Image: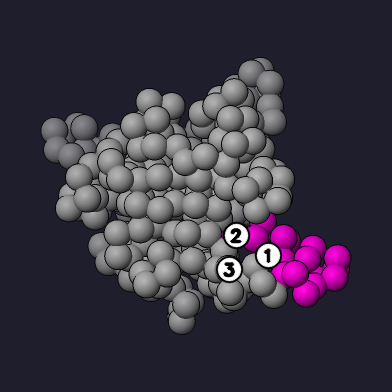
Amino acid sequence: MIETRHIRLAIAEGVATITLDRPERKNPLTFDSYAELAAVFRAAVTDDSFRCVVITGAGGNFCSGGDVHDIISPLLERDTKGLMAFTALTGELVKSMRACPQPIIAAIDGVCAGAGAIIAMASDLRIATPAARTSFLFNRVGLAGCDMGACAILPRIIGQGRASELLYLGRAMTADEGLAWGFFNALHPAGDLATAAAAMAARIAAGPGFANGMTKRMLGLEWAMGVEQAIEAEAVAQALCMTTADFRRARDAFVAKRAPIFEHN
C-alpha cells in the first residue's frame, strides 16, 4: 500500500481504515487528498494485505466536501481545460472506489456533504449515527446534481424520485430518512460507530476474499445487463469461484463440522 500524507491510513487484521483528518474544518477535501484517495483505492487492486476498507472522518464529522479555500476559490481562476482536469480528478476517485475489489464501508457521523456525500454513495455499505446529515448540495452552489456519478448511482440506492428530490433541492437527508430509504444499512450511537464499522469489516475480512471481490464486480457490471445476460455472467463468475482454494476449504470445514478459515484464494 502507498504512503499517505493527506489522509490517515492504517491496516490491521485484514482491514484498511482510511480517516479524513482535518477535524477543525469538518474534514474537507483538497486537490491532494482527492488524488491520494484515488491512488489508495487503485493500489488496493493488487494489495492482498487487507480484504475490506473502512472510510471515516475525524472529530464527529465525515466530510464537508471540497475545501472552499483550497479548491473552490482556485477553480474560479481556471479555464475550461483546467476545470475539466479537476472534474476528471474527482470522477477518478469514484471510479477507483468502484474498481477496488475490497468492499468499502463508510462510517458516517455529522456532516456528510458534497464530495463527502459522493464518497459515502460510492461505498458498498454505509453505517451512520443519528446525527448524520447527508447533503448532495451541488445546486446550492450553482452547479448541477450530476457530479461524480450521482445521477447514475444515487437513484439505484434510494430510487429515482428520492434522488431527484435531494439533487434538485440540495437539502440534507436525515439519518432516519437514509435508513428508511436504504442509503444506510444501520444506525449506531456515536460512541459505537467505530466499533460497529470494525465489526462489520472484520466479518467481511474473514470471508472469502476472491469471492467477495467477484460479488462486488458483478454488482457493478450487472447494472448494464439484462436478466438473461446477468445470469450467464454470474454462471461464469461462480464457476471461477469454484476453482479457488476457499471453495475447497469451505467444503472441508463443513465435513469436519467446523467454521471455515478463508485465505486469499
Tell me how far mark 2 sits from mark 3, CA to CA: 19 Å
Numbered badge on residue 47: none
Q: Is residue 133 left or right of residue 197?
A: right
Three-letter residue code for mark 1? Leu
Numbered badge on residue 89: 1
Find disc 3 in the rendering and name its residue: 68
Chief secondary structure of the magenta portion: helix
- Check disc 2 and report its element: helix, strand or loop: helix
Residue 34 position in % (x across, y down):
57, 68
Q: Residue at x 64, y 18 (%)?
A: 227
For the magenta stretch, what is the residue range?
75-93
Residue 239 position in % (x across, y down):
52, 33
Looking at this view, name the residue that lies furthest to the right. Answer: 80
Q: Is residue 68 left or right of residue 246?
A: right
Query: CB atoms at circles 1 and 2 under 8 Å apart?
Result: yes
Q: Residue at x 35, y 37 (%)?
A: 175
Callout 3: 10 Å neighbours few (<14), some, many (20+)? some
Three-letter residue code for mark 3? Val
Near-viewer residue (243 or 67): 67
Three-letter residue code for mark 2? Leu
Near-viewer residue (257 or 79): 79
- Check disc 3 and report its element: helix, strand or loop: helix
Residue 168 position in % (x across, y down):
64, 35
Query: Does label 3 or label 1 sit earlier along the sequence?
Result: 3
Residue 91 position in % (x across, y down):
67, 56
Numbered badge on residue 93: 2
Q: Residue at x 28, y 41 (%)?
A: 130
Tell me how far mark 1 sits from mark 2, CA to CA: 7 Å
